[in-house]
Amino acid sequence: MISLYVIGPSFLHKMPAFIKLILLGITSVIVLPVNSLLEIIIFVCVVLCLYIFCGYKIFRRIVFIRPLIPLLGLILIFHIWVGTVNDGMISVLRLLGMVLLANIITMTTKMQDLINAITPVLRPLELFGLSVRDLSLSIALSIRFVSVLFVVWNSMNESFRSKSGKNSGWRLLPPFFIQVLKLSEVIGESLTARGGISDANEPKVGRDVL
């Protein structure tokens, strides 16, 4: 439905989804307290090497993070203004590295594999009457949706530039939010029609999603 999975023979494609998610979590915990600019630069370089090793089809999609650049720029400008340039560069590079890492995991992992990896962790919640299947699907969609939003933004930005010859900037925010709301509605209707989200008052239409 909205999959950004890129078919490939890389080692990340062959790695089990639960291992990739565990490594992503461990990496987040390790990188968050790091305050050394050199160490953060090394981290970003390692992530970029992952894109290179996974092949050209993966590497060329690195441009999908362009919508993040204005936010990173604002963060850096704020730190320059308050006189903490070094901290600003660390914050920007840390955020950039983590987004790139999360993005490459979504591109090398199938949606169903994400759901299967998350489901066992949420299994204890069944004791509270919660649907583990619904929660797993929601979390997997949330992870996947980050990359989808990048694609939507880039598509709208390219369309704006082709018509006006200028960068969209903040002008694209209102139509972007409208597009996101429409996309959310379409996804919700699709899941309901295909039985993706269980409903105690409605029969299942289907069992397989994505």
Image: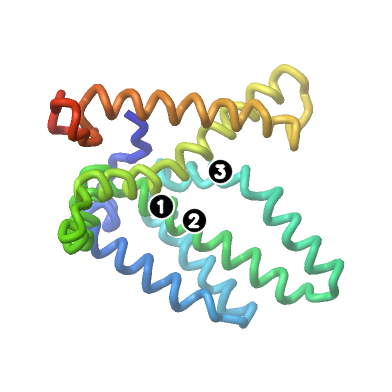
Q: Position of residue 157 (x, y in %)?
A: 65, 30
Ranked by sequence position, the earlier of labels 3 and 1 is 3
Taking the image as shown, residue 14 lies to the left or right of residue 173, namely left
Ranked by sequence position, the earlier of labels 2 and 3 is 3
Q: Quadrant of residue 118?
A: bottom left
Q: Quadrant of residue 12?
A: bottom left
Residue 104 — which label?
1
Q: Which of 96 and 179 is in front in this view?
A: 179
Q: Are marks 2 and 3 in contact (CB under 8 Å)?
A: no
Residue at left 41%, top 72%?
Answer: 27
Q: In the rendered image, which quarter contains the N terminus? A: top left
- Vertical position of residue 61 compared to residue 100: above or below: above
10 Å neighbourhood of mark 1: few (<14), some, or many (≥20)?
Answer: many
10 Å neighbourhood of mark 3: few (<14), some, or many (≥20)?
Answer: few
Residue at left 54%, top 74%?
Answer: 42
Taking the image as shown, residue 155 lies to the left or right of residue 15, namely right
Residue 194 — which label?
none
Residue 100 — which label?
2
Residue at left 18%, top 51%?
Answer: 116
Which amino acid type is shown beneath numbered disc 1?
A: Ile
Separation of residues labelled 3 and 1 (CA atoms):
12 Å
Which amino acid type is shown beneath numbered disc 3?
A: Val
Q: In which quarter of the image is residue 7?
A: top left
Separation of residues labelled 2 and 3 (CA atoms):
10 Å
Residue at left 21%, top 33%?
Answer: 199
- Vertical position of residue 57 compared to residue 176: above or below: below
Secondary element type, mark 2? helix
10 Å neighbourhood of mark 2: few (<14), some, or many (≥20)?
Answer: some
